[in-house]
Amino acid sequence: MTRKQRRLTLILSALAVIGVALGLVLYAMRDNIVFFYTPGEIVAKDVKPGTRLRLGGLVKEGSVEKGADRSVLFTVADAQSEMRVRYSGVLPDLFREGQGVVAEGVFEGAKAFRADTVLAKHDETYMPREVADSLKKQGHWQPGGPPAAPAAK
Amino acid sequence: MIVETGHYALVLAFALALVQGTIPLWGSLAGDRALMAVAAPASIMQFLLTALSFGALTYAYVVSDFSLVNVVENSHSLKPLVYKISGVWGNHEGSMLLWVLILALFGALVALRARRMPDDLAASVLAVQAWISGAFLLFILLTSNPFARIATPPMEGRDLNPILQDPGLAIHPPLLYLGYVGFSITFSFAAAALINGRIDAQWARWVRPWTLIAWMFLTIGIAMGSYWAYYTLGWGGFWFWDPVENASLMPWLAGTALLHSALVMEKRDALKVWTIFLAILAFSLSLLGTFLVRSGVLTSVHSFASDPRRGVFILAILVFFIGGSLALFALRASTLKQGGIFAPVSREGALVLNNLLLTSSCATVFIGTLYPLALEALTDAKISVGPPFFNFTVGLLFLPIFLFMPLGQMLAWKRGRLLGAAQRLTFAVAIALVAGLFLAAANGEPAGAAALAGLAMFVIVGAFVDVAGRVTGGGFSLALMARRAAGLPLSAYGTALAHAGMGLTLFGIAATGWGVERVISMRAGDTAALGPFTVTLDDLSQRQGPNYRETVGAMTLRSDGVEIGRVNPSRKFYTSRQMTTTDAGLKTISLGQVHIVMPEQNPDGSVDVRMYWKPYVALIWLGALLMFLGGGVSLADRRLRIGVAKRAQPRVRGPAPLPAE
């Protein structure tokens, strides 16, 4: 093999690996991306039932109903709308009424949502960032004081 | 007074960084030895000043000096001493101070070994290191001062986030930072080489030990963080593809690639441009990780209260260093001469493949982590890219890495024989097949787990085939074998250990497929089956800790009616933060673990219990430990080799620099 051929082999194999990696990324992106919506956005954007998404908002006070066998029903609300969430499993440590929550699962239509994961990812002020941003946008952001400037993002 | 001294020391360290960043660099460009000699003592002084500052903050924490905002917000007088100390870096300001301390530590270590390097290279490396230190010191002083006082000191602090009150906090961040920040040295070496315009095999020899140290600590730091998340977050998982985890995985992937390409550069004088690029990339990704974690663009247990000014400042640092180094790279890379040539099938070729696959994996992690952030910034749509994406892409890209790992080790430099290498691996393949079939028969579904475990066995056994072949190459007489074993370079053993460690980790990951999970409600006296064991909840009791109250479940594990251990999962309620955490009860049985958490107490007196049986799970972290050890063994060898090279080429040494006092 000449020097030129060797270099060509190197470049071609590099392109092949990068191509494969890119293909994998694009293929995986098709199925594995989940959008984040608040209940109001689901209504506004006319999301189709059966769509997998992340639902974020505040757990409505007094809405948590525990059933048999660790099934839980609770309402996630934002300023415009609310959504009844069905979940079977153990809720995270920091799940509380009146606090922010993110649930991942399937939108079943007619304000019903079946969650398979309820996330406890948030900062010290018990607010998931996505939820905080959405609430700020809707002008409902009250971090224990006067509403923050919406520009603070 | 001590606190003010600490603050003042930090200001002095910044001023010194300015001196260290300019004078030696000027000296190295102008060829002035006196100016270059400033670098080493300045680096050591820089470290001492930063250490003084860090010590002052630690003192404030230990004596619970509530006149400091930082201490008030993150400490409590009743907190155990170990958490008072580790709480120093359990918050934004303190963790940045630890970052700078380790940065200065690496600078000082290079300064202590500067005599073995050419003066101009040492001076430039330390100057670049000072630029990085200076930038972060300025960042601390302007936006994140840990020494800020409070006008009316409260009587009591607000306590540390309970999730962080764990021995993991004492270990994980320092180890991780040693790795993260360790790549600053390889970056400084790359930038210095570009500035001085001298990039050769010798450079690779100097930079390899530092890369190895950073890589070792990053490996163990990530593994430690993974174990901590495993036992503390209550989900029983060991890796969540959380953006913060990805932020540490990216430099690891780039660093692993760098480790291997620097080898090619050292032995064969090839892949020079690529190696320099990787050295820049590894640290750039560390900086990116710091930005992601510290700027508040992500929410996780790692992000503390955020302030937008900080994000902008770190972004500026990021742009300056990545942009600056890449500009320098573009300017100088074309002047590099191509080194040794090699056939596609050769050790070099295998290492190139390793680099391609590792950097591609790194790129997919990068895309998966940053795409949601970019999309949100551009279109306002919020998406999440979850574990399925990463498992699929990174998993598939790692398959060929595992397949070719033992094969690459077997190929000769310059030109190798694929068939010959494959033949020598027959034994490893046979073991892998037998192990895979045996595990499939013993553990049943899923078949994928057995196949992956078989692949892992191939990697583990294959890692030692090369060493075994070299030891037994002269016949099987015991004395000869012992002599040959002693004659092998330590780095051969290091490679074998590190590669086997990778295989162990893969085995542990594969075995998660055989795990058993149960979620049930239990009352005292109830017994439940868990895989091959039974779990009995004997008793529930309340206990009072120093700054929390806890409910502890006393459970007994039995196998065929025989007691094999007790586990005590608990729920802790931290009064000062009104926050609950769950502590898993763990019992290691051979290499597997029973993992039990009690996430909830029901009104009727029963508790919800989440139980896992995870066979071989300990291998995930033991594998990382083995990689760390392998790195250490290689490092011991390196030091000797640097000594030899020094004797062989005395002309590269200038007159000894001034002793560092």
Image (cartoon, coloured by chain):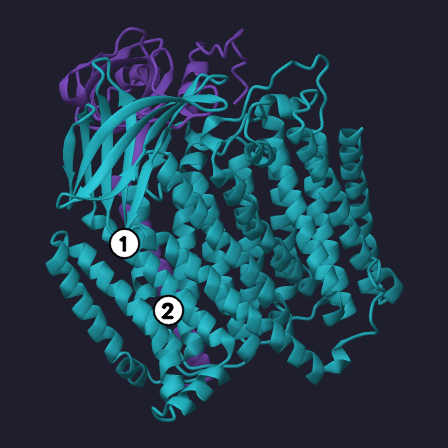
Picture mark count: 2
Q: Looking at the rendering, which quadrant does residue A101 occupy?
A: top left
Residue at figure coordinates x 69%, y 84% from the top left? B648
Residue denoted by label 2: A13
In this rendering, which labeled residue sits more in front, label 2 or label 1? Answer: 1
Residues B513 and A149: in front is B513
Tell me: B115 left or right of A104.
right
Give the chain letter for cyan.
B
Tell me: B24 left or right of B152.
right
Tell me: B563 left or right of A97.
left
Please, what secondary structure does the residue beneath circle 1 have? loop
Please, what secondary structure does the residue beneath circle 2 have? helix
Q: Position of residue B578 (x, y in %)?
A: 45, 16
Residue denoted by label 1: B590
Q: In the image, is residue B143 above or below residue B391?
A: above
Give the chain letter for purple.
A
**Farthest front residue in view:** B562
Res. B553 visible in picture: yes
Q: In the image, is residue B422 above or below residue B306?
A: below
Give neighbour class at mark 2: few <14, some 14-19, many 20+ (Cα, 10 Å): some
Q: In the image, is residue B424 above or below residue A14?
A: below
Residue at figure coordinates x 22%, y 72% from the top left? B431
Residues B550 and B345: in front is B550
What amino acid is found at the position of numbered circle 2 in the picture?
Ser
Give neighbour class at mark 1: few <14, some 14-19, many 20+ (Cα, 10 Å): few
Q: Chain of mark 2?
A: A
Q: CA distance from mark 2 to mark 1?
A: 43 Å
What amino acid is found at the position of numbered circle 1 in the picture?
Ser
